[in-house]
Image (cartoon, helix red, strand yellow):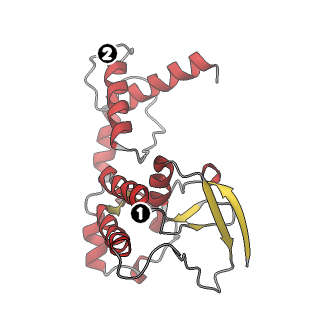
Amino acid sequence: MAEKTSTISNLKYDPRNARRHTPRGVGQIERSIQRDGFGRSALLASDDTIIAGNATIEAATTAGLEKVRIIETDGSEIIAVKRTDIVAGSPEFTALAIADNRTAEHSDFDPEILQALIDDDLIEPDELWFPEELERLLEDRPSEEQWEAAIASVPGGDKSPYQRMAFMVTDEQAEQIKQALASAKGIGDFANTGNENSNGNALSFVCEMFITEHGR
């Protein structure tokens, strides 16, 4: 079993991560890390893409942690993180245990990504959910008719292809994004059009301004 040291910036998020974490949940993890230190390990693929622990790494990044100790294994051994500074039954012990349980409650599955993984035969849903559970989980997913109607409402130009994207941000970052979008909506070519893709158009306009200013 090999061990190496890396940096948190070298880790890569899974673009098809089906788990959605709320800013509140990530914030709770961040506060726990700041107060009690790091306690929950992440699971990485061979190329350092995060399999499990996306929210934990996101919170650790925001908390200012940089170093990552990576234990390389083929899955035949149990990897345990031992905090030598924490005694069983102590306030720190209890705080970490409860925080680990509570933060898991502030996440759910993204029905769009989950359905795509099922369609691509990347997971066996019957092994994880009863049929009625999966039906409830996916019922919030917009129908093809609703998605087609949303695309049809976007004015002008070729309407295909379109992509749906999801990002995890902190509360502070969310406010900055909202302010940027609000400003862009007032000065772009699509200003005051009232179309349903105004946020997407505004974000594209902000990115275009950044690329123009920085030449990349």
Q: Which mark is residue 186?
A: 2
- Number of marks drawn: 2
Name the residue: 72% across, 70% down: 3
Name the residue: 37% across, 32% down: 177
- Name which of mark 1 and mark 2 comes first in the sequence: 1
The image quadrant where one finds the N terminus is bottom right
Can you give x and y, in whole percent of width and height, for residue 104 in the image?
34, 67
Can you give x and y, in whole percent of width and height, for residue 136 in the image?
24, 69
Under tag 1, what secondary structure?
helix
Where 86 sits versus 170, above or below?
below
Type of the residue with mark 2: Gly
The image quadrant where one finds the C terminus is top right
Type of the residue with mark 1: Asp
Q: Which mark is residue 36?
A: 1
Name the residue: 46% across, 60% down: 56
Question: Which of the pair 42/206 is nearer the observer?
Answer: 42
> How dense is the environment of label 1, judged by Cα within 10 Å: few (below 14), some, or many (20 and up)?
some
Question: Which of the pair 208/51 is nearer the observer?
Answer: 51
Name the residue: 45% across, 68% down: 118
